[in-house]
Image (cartoon, grey):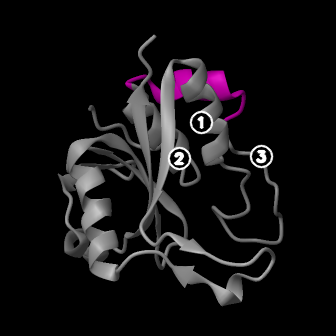
Amino acid sequence: MKLQTQNERWQCVVTAVAMVLNIEVQDLIRLVGHDGSEIAFPDLPEPERRLGHNIYEMIRVAVNLGYAVTPIPLRPATYPANNPSREIVIGSVEGNWNDFSGQLQHSRGVIECSGPYGYHVVAYDHGRIYDPRGQEFSYTRETCEQKNLYTYRLWRVDRITP
């Protein structure tokens, strides 16, 4: 995987997915149909005010290019319809971290993160993180958290064989 850097603060999703699909960001932007710069929420600060890109837009393009995209939550849970306050986590904390880390070591895709700077998406490839902000490093929970990347879901991207 080749590190690419986002041109704008609101372009982490499109940049991370471009890395995973091994295409240039501008090519993916053309396939999606917009660069995310539209001001959708004028009352919010940058970059939250921008339309940005949604992971589901990326999935549509990835599937059209011959990839399967599978979500793997760090904290899988179940709850009654319309009542998330009654959530029950599936599995143990340690087991869920082990499963999540195992997926990171044995596949490639993107990871959704939260932190003091809000929502952020990075690419990963077999244990290596490619941050659209310009950093590349080996994955550990501690390293991500030192960089204010609190991971909560990965999207595994696999080539579909006919």
Q: Of the two numbered discs 3 and 2 on the same chain, state the one appearing first in sequence.
A: 2
Residue type, mark 1 in image: Ile
In front of the other: 38 or 153:
153
Q: Of the two numbered discs 1 and 3 on the same chain, state the one appearing first in sequence.
A: 3
Q: Residue at x 82, y 55 (%)?
A: 40
Q: Is residue 24 left or right of residue 36?
A: left
Can residue 144 be seen?
no
Residue type, mark 3 in image: Glu
Q: Which residues are magenta?
A: 22-35
Query: At which x and y percent is residue 35?
Result: 66, 36
Q: Residue at x 67, y 88 (%)?
A: 86
Label 1, label 3: how far apart the Cα atoms are: 21 Å
Is 60 situated above or below 37? above
Of all residues shown, which one is farthest toward the top?
Answer: 162
Q: Is residue 71 left or right of residue 104?
A: right
Quarter of the image containing the N terminus? top left
In front of the other: 144 or 12:
144
Label 3, label 2: how far apart the Cα atoms are: 15 Å
The residue that disc 3 covers is: 38
The residue that disc 1 covers is: 59
Q: Circle 1 sits in a helix, a strand or a loop, which is it?
A: helix
Is 122 situated above or below 145? above
Q: Circle 2 sits in a helix, a strand or a loop, which is it?
A: helix
The residue that disc 2 covers is: 13
Residue 161 numbered mark, or none? none
Q: Of the two numbered discs 1 and 2 on the same chain, state the one appearing first in sequence.
A: 2
Can residue 27 be found in the magenta stretch? yes
Q: Circle 3 sits in a helix, a strand or a loop, which is it?
A: loop
Q: Is residue 42 left or right of residue 137?
A: right
